[in-house]
Image (cartoon, grey):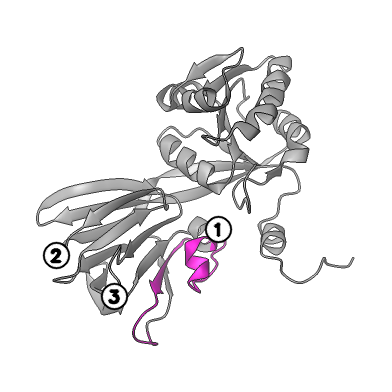
Amino acid sequence: MEREFRTIALIGKYQSPEIAGALQALVDFLLGQERLVLVEENTALSVGNYACAVANYETIGAQADLAIVLGGDGTMLNTARRLAQSGVPLVGVNRGRLGFMTDIASADMLASIAALLAGKFSREQRFLLDAEVWRGEERVFDTLALNDVVVNKGEIGRMIEMEVKVDGEFIYVLRADGMIIATPTGSTAYALSANGPILHPAVHGIALVPLCPHALSNRPITLSDRSRIEILLMPLHDARIHFDGQTHFDARAGDRVCIARSHHAITLLHPPGYSYLAMLREKLHWSATPRY
């Protein structure tokens, strides 16, 4: 039996007052459904406080049965990383551009949320990556990424050089602008623009996608999600490492970037009729509408 969604958190795109109307409509609707509503504190600060509790992510993780995210994929990425350890399921209302993960259209918001509260939804899990940066024997940075980890040349105007290993086995020395390590969720983000493969969310894989490699034989490859990837920055080549395009770390030559599947995962809830392939067809403008 599905857990009933009694306490619902609302999380909106920061510095985006245009979502205030949608957020107010959602608050009114949920209070009318006799649900306890928590508005994330930065959301409340950006768009105004409402007649309901204001909560930080720690409180949301401990108390919420569901989090509704109003924004684009960037807002969902930030929320997913912040709530990954709590297991709170997420549903997204698209107030951004493409909306690969925020799949409820603004016009359908209340009808879709009503269906969800009635138990009409599909559930999908997406895994995250654990990413660590090691300097000698010291771990100098660690975080989670839902989309991707990107090692790139930072501000310098030339290629960098890196040694790539998978499960301790030497693969190659890559001379390129960088490397994208992407989950299936991130395969439709930056990795897609670098000609990486699209991985269906049900595929247990991690994509390695070189950025502008010097050798044409350095092609994208999909690895098992049980693989451990290690990238060593070769001497004289510092780099900048990005995590979901929202957090970064400036690494030095000789640093090692270690990436593996995290034991944390997020749960996305989709409205009735959701189809991943139909979503790709719509967002990527594939062909015409099918004829039945």
Please report contact status of discs 2 and 1: CB closer than 8 Å, yes or no: no
Q: Earlier in the sequence, mark 2 or mark 1?
A: 1
Q: Mark number for residue 124?
A: none
Lateral position of residue 115 relative to residue 239, left or right:
right
Q: Secondary structure at mark 3?
A: loop
Residue type highlighted by circle 2: Gly
Q: Position of residue 135 (x, y in %)?
A: 13, 55
Residue farthest to the left, as pictured: 137
Q: Magenta segment, which residues?
A: 188-217
How far is disc 3 from disc 1 in space, using C-alphas? 37 Å
x, y percentage for residue 110?
Answer: 75, 31
201 is within the stretch colored magenta: yes
Viewer-closest of 194 and 273: 194
Would you say the residues marked 3 and 2 are in contact, meaning their CB atoms lie under 8 Å apart? no
Q: With respect to residue 19, does 128 lie above or below?
A: below
Q: Which residue is mark 3?
A: 158
Within the magenta stretch, is there residue 76?
no
Q: What residue do we see at 40% from left, 61% from top? A: 225
Amino acid residing under circle 3 = Arg
Q: Which of the two residues, 81 or 17, is positioned nearer the viewer here? A: 17
Residue displayed at 28% across by 79% down: 175
